[in-house]
Amino acid sequence: MNQISFLLLFPLAPALLLAFISNQIVRNLIVWVSSLALIFVSLSLATAHLGTSPEFFSVDSPVLEKLFFAGEIILSLYLLWRCRGINKKESYIPVLIILQAGIGIFLELSGKLPKVENAFYVDNLSIIMALIIGIIGTIICIYSLGYMKEYHEHHKEMKENSRGFFFIFFLFLSAMFGVVLCNNLVWLFFFWEVTTLCSFWMIGYSKTEEAKRNSYLALGMNLIGGLGFSIALVYLTFFTKAPTIELDKLIHAGSALALIPACLICFAGLAKSAQLPFSSWLLGAMVAPTPVSALLHSSTMVKAGVFIIIKMAPILQHTTAGLFLAGVGGVTFLMASLMAVSQSNAKRVLAYSTIANLGLIVTCAGVGTYEAIWAALLLVVFHALAKGLLFLTVGTVEHKIGSRDIEDMEGLIVLKPFLGVVMLIGIAGMFLAPFGMLISKWACLKALMDASPILAVLLAYGSAPTLFFWSKWMGKILSVSSNAVTMESPVDTNEATALTSLAIPTVLTCLLFPLIASVAIEPYISNLYGQTMSLSRGNMLIMTIMLGLIILVPLGFVFYPRKQKHVSSYLAGANVSGSTSFLGAMGVVKDVATRNYYLSAAFGEAKLSKASVILGGALILGMFVVVII
Amino acid sequence: MTKIALVLAYVIGGGVLGGLLSGFDRILTARMQSRKGPPLLQPFFDVLKLMDKRTVVVNNYQTFYVACFLIFIVLTGSLFFVGGDLLLTIFALTVAGIFLVLGAYSSHSPYSTIGAERELLQMMAYEPALLIAALGMYWVTKSFHVSAIVSYSHPLIAVLPGIFISVLFILTIKLRKSPFDLSTSHHAHQELVKGLTTEFSGSSLAMIEVAHWYENIMLMGFVYLFFASSPIIGIAATILVYILEVLIDNMYARLTWQFTIVSSWTVTAGLAVTNLMAITLLLK
């Protein structure tokens, strides 16, 4: 319990301190110290509870309940106050806020809220999440120290508000710990709404017109989801045979009793994890400074969405509603992967890939069998690592080369070797065997085939474009023009530390993943389902061999005798200066340029996004229809 | 121990057999075009000659990627022939393919870059069919392991005909045969010079050639799985399939990438997915 209260409350201390301190050195010190403290405590929470059965903690404090209630009201009032900036189209937002606040007040004052036995809990899933938040989240925070400084050097026109930024950052972490450690659904919902508020604030950071509109979009969509959550609370209080607002009791009630509230909560999860038809808010969120994207995509926000859906998995197992939910995830995976092909903006590619991978997690959770959940949890862990790393690298690259367009990253491996290598590790981590994401996808494919083959087919089709858009990005980084020279400009220490400390685990998890699976994931699953799965030793051996090859072969080449003759590349015999320019048809000297395929006529957003939104919406509707009938 | 023996058998035998298959391919093609064709061992002479030449490169990295390509192809084949996990084999094959593509990208040459893009498009076209074939075999035999699939008592072709045809379709892409030899071709009518392999020469080119031998043998092994319950029919069918592919190669001109993707995805969806859905409903 001590660790839980530490994780919930401690981040508020640096948050408040940082809200008043603008001295860079003091800020660095506070962020470093509190980050290390959070890492240490989340690790000690893990060592104390990993592998054990879930532990519950009761808090009998009317004062605390009043505080949460007051918090809800303040939250709603603040959001209403921020609604000054909305335009006509966004006028649905205050309505949603008032509706939600009304429901909250009604529930509290009705006196019918069921008594809560255990307000907090720790199980293996919440430990995995706490480690992701506590370690990856704080690494991103350390990175922001360097990034935000450079960000404002690059954007002089923008009003600097780093104090607010770091305040919100730590508040966000605290709220995320709340989401994964609360057993009281009303409190969980409060933290849930705090994460909505934090992301709204962060997306609107730059105060440009685009940032404002996108932040309201994120707020609106998450409030729609949140409304689902409030209705679930009402349902649980008034319309069930055994009213409860405790997460564990809800899950144990099973699909016969708890399917309707579970679907409502999953609906909130879908909005939060940017599944179709809600994907647009996450795409819009990239107007924010890059660490914000890294945070939203890897360790917070969207992960809260899939966390709650995974929690509901035992209820959804073997239900038609669960299959519809899985369908939403499957379609999201396929469509987002296809649309990613047409993007040359690195952050947008990453955003689509996040949406796609979350779709895969939702698919697994909707299926809800023990195999599927095993795969889903692996995906959560590996995705958090690799995606965090990729966003941070893109952020630094953007500051160094002045662009986030993949076409401008040509030859990065020679121009900026450190960033090039880190980026390659991140990309390989996302889609290549034997890195984590691929192992997880493999597990997914097996699990889906056992549960519902049509979902496995969606996965088979969706992984093909994934391969295409990642490989061409890799190719761009490795494409070396003959006049390229290394110009490594120093990377900020905070940024370099963060990048290294994410890149190394991305590689190491390939080796350590059997350990992660057996220590953290399998106990959770066997506790929930009474059975679990693990990878066969033979396959583990093969993956170790593959990893060994990928690491050792490059090393071998350092000592490779280089007796090769170097020539210019073939330009149909019209080379002018080596392979960098050629004599064109009209006798003009032209530079050689290569560009990737984006195939926007076939895979463009304009062509696919509308259909995807309709399909996603229809599947969600289907889910509710089968539940109610 | 048998596993190590199998790997060794593939590493030695796979290469030899692959070279012979390539020689056979060339004779057959020549006969279809009313020519006599080269001797059966010509591919080996070609590779020996390539090895003897000085390697000319645009940059040092190229050779590295090609070496990785060869190593991963051999690894993929070994995995397949020791009876390993079919999905893992497909993933390893993908990794190998990506190394070749990266090799082509690294030269920054316009011809090989377009070759690389097209190679990726081809991979995108055939990937779903391969995965769905593995899923179908898994559903029938209850295992992803090649060893279990090969020892299944009934012929898989009887329950997986749709999947088999879709595999045949994408096999044309994998074997780099017309009408789908977009990224690089054995024929001398390329608008991309040699596409993907434009900037490779000497021993690098030899490695690519040898890797294709190994790859083709593995692919023939994949075809064999559909008939594995009776080895004689299996081998005969595999040879027939190869002859069919050579015939198709000689019958068609090259088509566009759009057609490649759309046709292979449609064939996969229409035949393989329907087949898969049917067996999952009928064979519980």
Image (cartoon, rainbow, N blue to C red):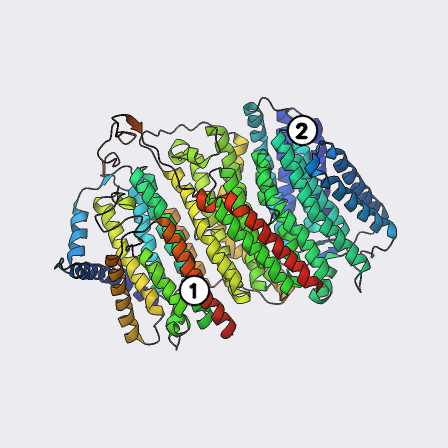
The disc placed on residue A163 is 2
Give the residue at mark 1.
B272
A243 or B241: nearer the viewer: B241
Residue A399 to residue B72: above or below: above
Q: Which of the chains bears the disc numbered 2?
A: A
Q: Residue at x 28, y 66 (%)?
A: B241
Q: Residue at x 54, y 46 (%)?
A: A609
Q: Which one is in front, A621 or A297? A: A621
Report whether residue A43 is seen. Answer: no
Q: In this rendering, would A516 be left or right of A312? A: left
Amino acid at circle 1: Ala
In x, y percent, where is residue A54?
68, 58
> Image point 35% across, 51% down: which residue?
B97
How far apart are the two marked residues, 1 and 2, measured between alpha carbons? 57 Å
The quarter in which the C terminus of chain A is drawn is bottom right
Quarter of the image where one finds residue A159: top right
